[in-house]
Amino acid sequence: MNAFVYDIPTKVYFGENQLGHLGEELKKYGDRVLVCTGGGSVKESGLLDKVLEEIKKAGLSFVELSGIEPNPKVRSVNRGAQICRDENVDVILAVGGGSVIDCAKFIAAAAFYDGDAWDIMTKKYEPEKALPIFDISTLSATGSDMDAGGVISNPDTHDKIGFSIPGLLQPKVSFLNPSLTFSVSPYQTACGSADILSHIIESYFVTPDESMYMLDRIKESLMKTVLEYAPKALEDPENYEARANLQWAASWAINGFTGAMQTSEWSCHPMEHELSAFYDITHGLGLAILTPRWMEYILDETTAGRFYDYGVNVFGIDPGLSEMEVAKAAIEKTKTFLSETLGLPSTLREIGIDESHFPVMAEKACSSSVLQGFKPLKKEDIETIYHMCL
Amino acid sequence: MNAFVYDIPTKVYFGENQLGHLGEELKKYGDRVLVCTGGGSVKESGLLDKVLEEIKKAGLSFVELSGIEPNPKVRSVNRGAQICRDENVDVILAVGGGSVIDCAKFIAAAAFYDGDAWDIMTKKYEPEKALPIFDISTLSATGSDMDAGGVISNPDTHDKIGFSIPGLLQPKVSFLNPSLTFSVSPYQTACGSADILSHIIESYFVTPDESMYMLDRIKESLMKTVLEYAPKALEDPENYEARANLQWAASWAINGFTGAMQTSEWSCHPMEHELSAFYDITHGLGLAILTPRWMEYILDETTAGRFYDYGVNVFGIDPGLSEMEVAKAAIEKTKTFLSETLGLPSTLREIGIDESHFPVMAEKACSSSVLQGFKPLKKEDIETIYHMCL
């Protein structure tokens, strides 16, 4: 059992009618705020007006950065960092989904660096300080509201790089109001739920040294929460209980608590990052297509035990069946959940992706020659998994 | 579903060989440390020497407060607060079990108050600042290492008062090394496990408004962890896996995460505090005797549903039985676990307690006329429960 450091300092206001605390919390960190937003939905919904109102009421000033893209691009990080320097910004507030929050995080670090923010992603520059980050999350998916990481894309190089800087990039304060996710479309709700599930799967399928009974049972609880409530949120988008469970599960799937002892790499995320770097597809959709194929590919006698626990404890499969029978049934149920229950496409062809870039994508996905996941994967393995997804 | 604020800033170094980080962390908060200890076991085990060595190595100075009692007394808080003022202490380090950590917390607050520290417990003085608190925990029980509260006794008045001050009394940094709990006696291991279980039960038995599917499943995971590993720790005291699971479960049982939405009072803890205020018994033992009787007393058609979930999901009782059958079986299993598996006395008479103080204890336990728990309890109800424990 590995030792670990637990360090999740984010304060969370969860529920409706908490926005009144925004001003008092921001004031603790300064008086000039950069407000980051995405494509305009927070403006249309009236949320942005309410937020700006709270900022003004607290006697703070603000400057805006709008138009942050899904799969946020490094140019937005550079743009935001420049504003921080020009406008003497004290604190950054992201209002939106995971893309906006991820972008805000790297702006917070890049604000102290005069060069290209891409240098942070390539580790040419290693940030030692960052502006304080706040967020008001409008989508349950990436869990960016409590973790120390994010993912930034560079369209020029087809690169999409994600990593975390613990102790630096965790938001100081997050506002999670499940009602704000009522308006999330069925497609984005499905993709977000696939993303949450994948985060837990990435930390659940680990070796015994990286595992702990208590945390395994908690990871199963989080997975069961997604299985229980994603369908309810799809059926009834304004079901507060469903939206609340998904939102809090999204944060805890990735904030560092359940994966504390993990030293191995994640598997599906690096493979998916290449998919969305090359084709700009929604991250959760890529994960939904990849995950069951990755499971099929790595299933063997050495890994079946873990799949057995997954099958019995998450899907309630008969524990009397053999390890391999339970494992296969669990993978089948995973596939059915993602494609039929969530209604997501289950092959790459359906979304217009063919094999033409597989070799280079596979090479990029295991940049250090082997992807050291639950079961180590070489370039050839990853290419095969991509082919299984066609 | 209630709104809530999540705010658990404690950084935790979990596992063996983490003590090397003590100096660097303490230094962030100052250079004069008050080291608080209990009855001498940390001196005998050599732990205290190692801790003082780390403090010296970091170039910090220290002063000691030893002899903090189990069920810590207000006189120790006053003594510690005086030392803080006289010696210009910057940061407090508790080395020991929950009693030492609880005492350190109220010392941290009392250091800024010239009067009797008991005024904090009676809310005559409401602290607005406190010295930073560190701890090295040697016992898995109270979870004081991540929460904002503690319990202090006043032998003169037979009062034992516990409460928390979120945002002020959470430790800044906790060191949790499961190996340090290898030497905990079977009796204290059993009492500690009963305490952990009780903390989860107190937040599991709540009304639907105070509950959330995801958190209910997590609470069940924590309870199952105690059921699984307390017997293993009793059988093999140096079983690292067992000690690690119990220790991390102890923190998460009470740090505020699972009980975030709860607005009702706890039930067994206020009743137990009177037992140990009058008879100075170990807190976990009092809880082990009280909990099954409280369950029997409150079980009826309105509460049976919650007991059904508890029975099916924690003890694996056949879900096909009726709600009431499952509920009764679950209470029986709780009783058997506490008395037979943990080997704790199951009646008050066995530990020399009779009914003589029941009326005044019952009155004190519901100081505001009704104990507003999962099922509200009046003085007469509490007296009856005490009698059921004889």
Image (cartoon, coloured by chain):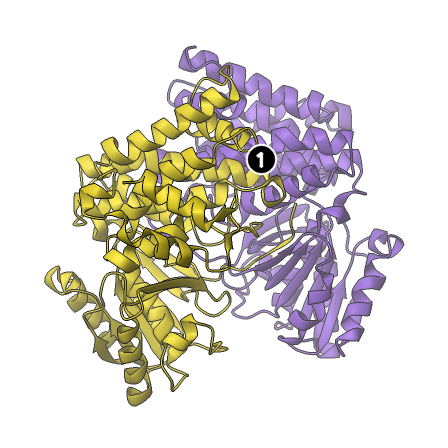
Chain colours: A purple, B yellow
Work out whether residue A73 can be spotted.
no
Of residues A355 and A91, the one drawn nearer to the viewer in this rendering = A91
Q: Quadrant of residue A284?
A: top right
How many badges with numbers are in the image?
1
Q: Amino acid at mark 1?
A: Ser
Identity of the residue drawn at 21% across and 36% down:
B343
The N terminus of chain A - image quarter: top left
Q: Residue farthest to the right?
A: A44
Where residue A91 appears, as percent x and y from the top left, is 67, 71
Q: Quadrant of residue A212?
A: top left
Q: Which residue is mark 1?
A: A198
Q: Would residue B183 appear left or right of B113 to someone viewing this image?
A: left
Where residue A332 appears, as percent x and y from the top left, is 58, 17
The C terminus of chain A - image quarter: top right
Where residue B31 appears, as percent x and y from the top left, is 32, 82
Chain of the residue under the numbered disc 1 shown in the image:
A
